Image (cartoon, rainbow, N blue to C red):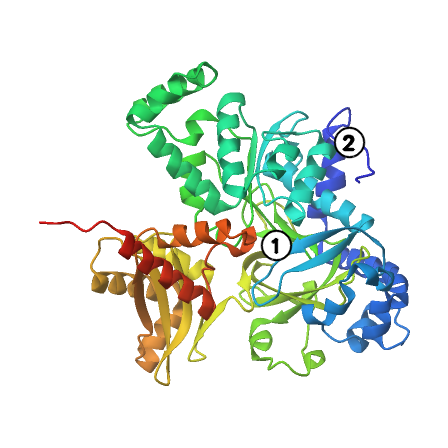
Amino acid sequence: MYRRQALLAGVPTHLTWERYCGFLDLSTPAFMQVQRRRLTETLPALAKSGIGRTFLDGRNVSTVEQLRRVAPLTSFDDYRSFFQPLMSITLPEPPIFWAKTSRLNLDQAMIPYNQTAFEHLMDGSVAAFLLAAADGRGETRLEPQDRVLYNFPPSPYLSGMLAQGLTALVRLRPVVDFDEAEELDFQDKVALGFERALRGGVDVVASMPSVLLKMGESFEQRSKGRSALGLLRNPRVAWRMLAALLRSKREGRSVLPKDIWKLKGLVCWGTDTGIYRDQIRHYWGCDPYEFLAITEGGILAMQSWTREGMTFVPGTNFLEFIRESDALAWDGTGSSELTTCLLDEIEPGERYEVVITSCVGMPFLRYRTGVLVDVLATEDEAAGISLPQVRPCGRVHDLIDIAGFTRLDEGTIAAAMRDAGLSPFTWTARREYEGPDPILRVYMERNGRDETDVVVALHRSLLDRDNYYRDLQEMLAIRPLRIAVVESGAFRAYASDRRARGVDLDRQSVPHINATDEEIEDLMLTSRALVEAAPTLVP
């Protein structure tokens, strides 16, 4: 499927770096030149497609300014009728596969991927892996035959297609063969990958941060006492474990994954990566490397070797931005009246929704991704990068609005949970009402602490983490936080039940933000079932 020559074998490192990571050397004016050129090149084919004719209403559009003036902003609903196998003739380029996606507030969908878009996705993936294993500009430790542990959802999710294409292109070795992994559910695949990595080693791990933390915690518990002795009985694991046991004993702690493997890179995605950075480093011995990707647009932005802010990728999508206040104020009508700005107009300290127009034959035209980014700075002076630095902070619909005064995202609440000494995994939060008053209801598992103490600790953490939440109390005298306690193990049992019923992987867990009434009802039913199943102590 990927037509380009395999890398890292007989190709000078500096040429590979320049080809895939050279965008980090662009100035903002040069970035904008690439953006304009790429969009201008793609407009003729886009205008002739069924999608182009629909959104451009037959008008001739050949410049960036004309497109922004004529074309409306679009949402996923605008494309539903086009995303059917028999409607491929309406697309700018024919698809070579359909990628599965599931987003909050959207029904599950299959999105068409063409050859050009897939190759650009792979180019971005190569760049991310090179940078994840880099110590500085032009210095990457990634090599052919490096072993990679992928904890990605499998194909037809785009992440599964990415893993297979990247392995072939860079000649990496998956710890678990893809054909074998396809036959396993996600939890079994993670467990098998962990076991294989113990035996054969691993150089790069690509995973969701929550999985990394759970693997670290599980390994720490498993390495204690008899579990550690059991690992020593396996001759292929014993030498790794002995060295790790000696290392951890010198430091007076349990064995951790970092004692077993010295990773070249740790690739993560998701807004909670930054929240758990310290814990991931504790377990795995290196900072996670982050990139921002969506099924509709591929890789949008990625970190440099510094693992700080992210830099947008110029050639795959033409980028526009909507200020957060405008994005949230939109009432569902008149979308074309929303004002956008370009990359050279975004301002540090502001938050924006990302809008994309595909430059690689994908069907999305001025598409509101829902992705929100904080603009950190106009450049990364320490790394010598002269492009705006951003940090993903969630999605437009993944916010909890209380009284129009504060809009809490998953990252803020997760950080507050951690600061309050509460589980970073077993919680969900949403806006509910007590009479006419909006409240922030956080559902969390029983943890042995007094409920009043938990409310006070979490409220205090939210005050420290979010200025607007603090203003809500100080200016309006509102304390919106409420706690709903569910039985210990309820979140795990909820996921297990849905997995057993064949629910798709991305729908198995309770979402951290804005769970539906049905999801909350199922969680509470699961909690009650655990209470009823618990043995009764007879005096």
Q: Is residue 167 left or right of residue 54?
A: left
* Residue closer to the observer: 133 or 55: 55
Name, please, the residue furthest toward the bottom: 436
Q: Nearer the viewer, residue 184 or 449?
A: 184
Residue 379 — which label? 1
Observer able to see residue 275: no
Quadrant in the rendering for residue 451: bottom left
Asked if residue 82 shows in the view, the reply is yes
From the viewer's perspective, is residue 192 above or below residue 199?
A: below
69 with respect to 376 (left or right): right
Q: Is residue 64 above or below residue 110?
A: below
Q: Position of residue 283 (x, y in %)?
A: 41, 36
Instruction: Where is residue 393? Give x, y as percent.
Output: 52, 60
Measured along the vertical axis of the image, is residue 313 above or below residue 36? above
* Residue type of the residue flagged with mark 1: Glu
Q: Amino acid at mark 2?
A: Ala
Mark number for residue 6? 2
